[in-house]
Structures are given as structure tokens and as C-alpha cells.
Amino acid sequence: MEFLTKNISGWQAALEGMRAPLKSYNKADSYFDYKNNKIVIGPRDYRLAKSLWEGGSEHRKWMRQVQVWVEIAAPLFFWSEWDTYHIGVSCNSESTMHTIGKAQLSIADFDSSVSMKNYSYKALSYIIEILNKLINAYNTPNLAKTIQSDLLVEIKSLLPCSYIQRRFININYEVLARMYQQRHNHRLPHWRVNFVNWINSLPYSEFITGNFTKEKSYDIIKENKRKSKMLEQIEKELREEKQQRKKKNKCDSKQEKEETEEVKEDKEIEENNKIKEEDIKENIIEIFKDEDFEEEDEEEDYEEEERELRSRIERQLEK
């Protein structure tokens, strides 16, 4: 008998929905560890999930939303008991109708989890021999369909309950919890040992079995300490960033202040220069007003007056 877990999903959505009744979404602290490919339930979420588990199936609805896909190879007598559980369970199985006549059977195709006594082994070997003869007859070329159907019925009728059938099951944590409660002390080792061992291999199996240990509490404390250290580190980094921003703002404001002072000085100088230029222009106009120029026919007198005027203007500009 073999259990092979294919996939487990729904943890994050189920734990988030668990907080819907009180809208306490801000208190959620679970996350998915992508490095190790597993869900990590935070201390606050764990405490709430456990209290809901203690309230019974009507309160722990989140467990119905955690889905498990598992491949199980088990004897037919095990499946006859498994089929008691229909609600919340779906499966695809190997069909004996379509596959039983395709190949010869051997001891490996039957359950051997319990050591058989000598006479049991001989009886099973004899039945396998008869079945293989029927399979050979079933595969006879050009055999009439009616005869082939009769042979198939004979094969299925003689097939022992220890024949291994493989099924692919989809089931949720709530159904598994009910199955565990009813089957973990079963007389068959397939339930008591194989099934229980598989359940214990699932993540956070204590929500299925109810076996909440102190070790899990220590894990919660350890996780809480790890998160506290992480938060302290984040706060430290934020404080450092804030101080750096303050320093930068101070430098920027100082630089802006210096720049504004320089701009003010430049503006004052520019205004003073404008005032000086206007004064000079006024003086030049006054000079032109005060001077009484007489027209002279001779070019020498005109040039002399022009030079004198230029020199007076230059003196004014120098002042």
C-alpha cells in the first residue's frame, strides 16, 4: 500500500477567509515560504485557527478550504471502506473493466503488506494462474463479443479483494479530520498504520489529528522572535533613512539660503548699476542742454568742440 501526496493548496486563501467574521485582516501574519515551498502559519493565525478547531466543525470552516491531492495504491477491500466517505471527496481510479484483460497478473499486483502464510500464498498463486488463463482466452483474436464479455465477467468475479487499485483523490482537511477520528484505531493496519502515517506527514497535521504538542508552541515562540528581530531591523533601517533625509534637507536648505543671498546681492548691484546709468544719461542730457553750439564753417573748430565734449562725457562716466 502506498500514499503519495501530489499537491496541497488553499492555505493562504483559507487563513485569510478565517478572519472574515470579525474583519481582522490586519492581524494576519501567515506567509508562503517560496524558498522551502511551504506555508508558514504565523503565531496570531495559529492561535485563532486552533481556537476555531476547538469550537468544532461548524466553526473551523477554513479547514474545508485546504485541499489535498493524493495518489493511493491500495487493495480493493480498503477501497470498499474508503467509499463510505463521499462528501468533500472526488477521485479518478484505474478501471478494471478497461485494464484487467490487457496484461498477465502476478503476485506484485496484489496486497502483500501483511505476510501471508504458506497456504494463503499457494491459494493466491493458484487463483492468479486461473485468471491468466482466462485473460489469454479473452485476448484470443477474432473472438465473439458475447464470449469476450462472459470471460470479462468471470475474470472480475474471480479477482481477489487483495488486488491493488490506484486512485487519485482530492479531499480537504475537514474530511480527513473526520476520517482520522473514525479510523486511526481501526483493526486493519492499512488504516491504523499506513493511513495514520500519511496523515502525520501532512503540513500542520495537528489540525487533522488534534495532537497539539508543546513543540509546536515552541515553534510559534521561535517564529515570533524571528519576526520581532525582522521588525527591529526594518525600524532601524527606517530611522537611518529618516536621519539621512533630514541631513540632506538641511544641506539643501543651507544651499538654497546661500543661493538666495547671492541672488539678492546680484539684484542690488544690478539695480545700483541701472541707477548709475540713468544718472549718467541725465547728466549727458544736461550737458547738451547747457552748451550753446554755434555753427562754424571751419572744420577744425568743430573737431575741437567734439573732442572736448567726449572728454567731459568720459569724466562723467568715470565718476
Image (cartoon, helix red, strand yellow):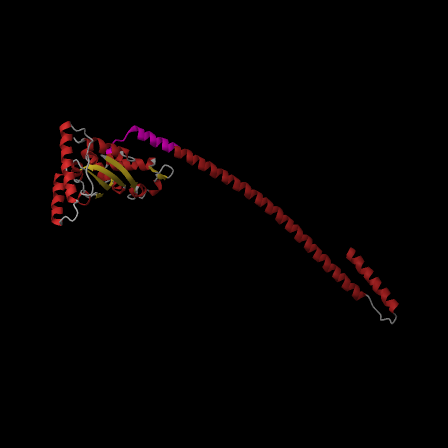
Toward the top, the furthest residue is 118
38 within the magenta span: no
- Using the image as rendered, state which of residue 93 and residue 227 is in the foreground: 93
Q: Is residue 146 left or right of residue 314?
A: left
Task: Measuring from the top left, give residue 202's x and y in whole percent.
Answer: 28, 35
User: Where is 90 relative to 293, above or below?
Assistant: above
Looking at the rendered image, the quarter that the N terminus falls into is top left
Residue 180, quarter of the rendered image: top left
- Using the image as rendered, state which of residue 290 and residue 271 is in the foreground: 271
Residue at 25% x, 34% y is 198
Residue at 28% x, 29% y is 213
Task: Measuring from the top left, give residue 41's x and y in whole percent.
Answer: 33, 37
Q: Is residue 74 left or right of residue 236?
A: left
Q: Is residue 58 left or right of residue 153?
A: right
Looking at the rendered image, the quarter that the C terminus falls into is bottom right
* Magenta portion: prevailing SS class: helix
Residue 56: tell me if it is visible: no
Residue 253, quarter of the rendered image: top right
222 within the magenta span: yes
Toward the front, the furthest residue is 141
Q: Residues in magenta?
A: 209-225
* Numbered label tally: 0
User: Where is 222 relative to 146, above or below?
Assistant: above
Task: Measuring from the top left, give residue 111's x and y in whole percent.
Answer: 19, 34
Residue at 14% x, 34% y is 126
- Using the image as rendered, state which of residue 125 and residue 297 is in the foreground: 125
Residue 37, quarter of the rendered image: top left
Residue 213: tell me if it is visible: yes
